[in-house]
Image: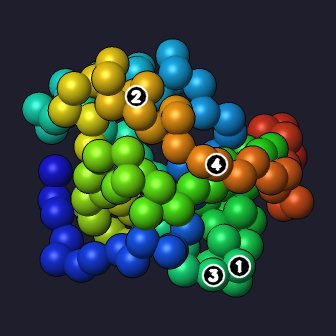
Amino acid sequence: MRVRQEALPDDELVVVRGGLLDKRRLRRDAGLAFRRFGEHGISVLGVADETALDLLARTILVRESVLTLMRVGAIRGAGLEVRPTFRRPHFTVMLPNLDTDLDRLLACDTVVQDNPHAKPPEAQG
């Protein structure tokens, strides 16, 4: 897993891909990361403001009808690492103790909002 040398401030929002946080989906994705990189983690996208969030909502996350947001400080406060990986805006929430860490992540305060730019799969063609 390629790691960037940058920090994400605690007050910056993190978009957890899109959709609702579902433990089964998160466990599956963490397992895929483990098979590929040897570490459990889930992908998230970092945004600094509403403009950046809107850009992600109409591009990368256009397939998602809802977006789940949480502050980096909430994730760190739960004892989890947010690692800058690959290219910006990608980050990975590391889950070394998968079951315990998933529970901690799911206990974090979140904001769920509709994606006003969501398009059904057949309209994305």
Q: For mark 1, give the secondary structure.
A: helix
* 2 or 4: tag closer to the N-terminus: 2
**Circles 1, 2 touching at the beta carbon (< 8 Å):** no
| Residue 92, visible in the rendered structure | no
Q: Secondary structure at mark 3?
A: loop
What type is the residue that disc 1 sits on? Glu
User: Gap between marks 2 and 3, in whole Å?
Assistant: 26 Å
Task: State the CA–CA distance, disc 4 to disc 1.
Answer: 16 Å
Q: Neighbour class for label 2 at 10 Å: few (<14), some, many (≥20)?
A: many
Q: Which residue occupies the extreme left position in the image?
A: 38
Residue 122 coordinates in the image, percent (x, y): 83, 38
Residue 91's place in the image compared with 28, above or below, is below
Circle 2 residue: 102
Q: Which residue is mark 3?
A: 49
106 and 63: which one is in front? 106
Tell me which amino acid carries mark 2.
Answer: Leu
Task: Check disc 1: other Cα within 10 Å, few if <14, some if 14-19, many if 20+.
Answer: few
